[in-house]
Image (cartoon, rainbow, N blue to C red):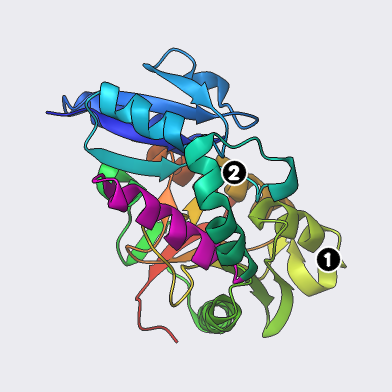
Amino acid sequence: MAPLGIIAGLGELPVQVADAAIERGQGVYVLRLKGFEEPALATYPGEVAGIAEIGKAFKAFRQAGCEQICFAGIVKRPDFQALKPDLKGISLLPKAVAAARQGDDALLSFLIKVFEDEGFEVIGADQAAQSLTIGAGSLAGAAPTGTMLDDLKKAAEIATVMGRHDIGQGAIVANGLVLCVEAQEGTDEMLRRCADLPSQLRGSPTDRAGVLVKRPKPDQERRIDLPTIGLATVELAAEAGLAGIGFEADGALILNHDAVKARAEALGLFLYGFPEDWP
């Protein structure tokens, strides 16, 4: 089986994708992006390349015998003027800049097409590590009812509206009030902003209220940047006094599944997968 090529940024996701490939006997070749090298990936087969060194990436993956490519990990939008592209990168840079002006989704879709045009099959992290996906229903804690269920539905609707405008994937609602929406700062910073709000709006560790919802954007290219929930998400949601976290079933990734579930239950939070047709 040809090794899985991983274009890796920061965080646990690329590590778990790599481990899943190794466990099934596929093996990996990890291209760690310069400036976003995840230390835990240093011992895996691979090398480091700049974001705009596209030709180097093609050559490395071909020499490693890779046929499938997976994008995984946290990478911030680059400063295109500061990039140092190789020859292939130079030829693609104008189109990349034009795509970036249309939004993150357009840029990610462009990157996928670049690799597909070179003959690689691009797969999502959900396909590369299927154990990270979660179906509908309660994953941890008691199933939400009443006000919490209403908050979940409203937050799911808000996330959909925001996603249509390519703004973000998350929203926080408590007792019918929209407290925060996710933009370029990401989920963690959104949760920290929420924690700074008055406790009567968001609840507290002893009287929890409100929910975080994460879901893909309606027209999102799902092979890159699916919403991800990890231990940090649970910890920050708990610090913000929220009652739980909702996610679109089969539309989000949960890292360290057992640990996340155990931590949520220990902190008194629920985790709940809602159907794709919400709201």
Residue nearest the observer in this picture, 81 or 149: 81
Q: Position of residue 254 (x, y in %)?
A: 42, 48
Provide residue 2's location: percent of width, then percent of height: 17, 29
Q: Main secondary structure of the magenta part?
A: helix
Q: Earlier in the sequence, mark 1 or mark 2?
A: 2
Question: Which residue is at 35% across, 76% downward?
Answer: 276
Tell me if I can see residue 9 in this picture: yes
Return the residue found at the far top. Answer: 43
Identify the amino acid type marked 1. Answer: Ser
| Residue located 33% across and 56% down the image | 134
Q: Is residue 45 magenta?
A: no
First to last magenta residue range: 102-122
- Disc 1 is placed on an element classified as helix
Callout 2: SS: loop
Crowd tier of the residue under label 1, counting other residues whose Cα lies within 10 Å: few below 14, some 14–19, many 20 or above? some
Residue 43 lies, in percent from the top left, at 44, 12
Is residue 14 at all visible to an observer of this figure?
no
Side of 107 where 236 appears, left or right: right
The correct choice, above or below, for 91 with respect to 244 in the image is above
When the figure is inspected, residue 173 is found, relative to residue 68, above or below; the finding is below
Q: Nearer the viewer, residue 156 or 162?
A: 162
Task: Tell me the residue at 29%/52% (across/down).
Answer: 116
Would you name the residue on which mark 1 appears?
Answer: 199
The C terminus sits in image quarter: bottom left
Q: Residue at x 51, y 67 (%)?
A: 106
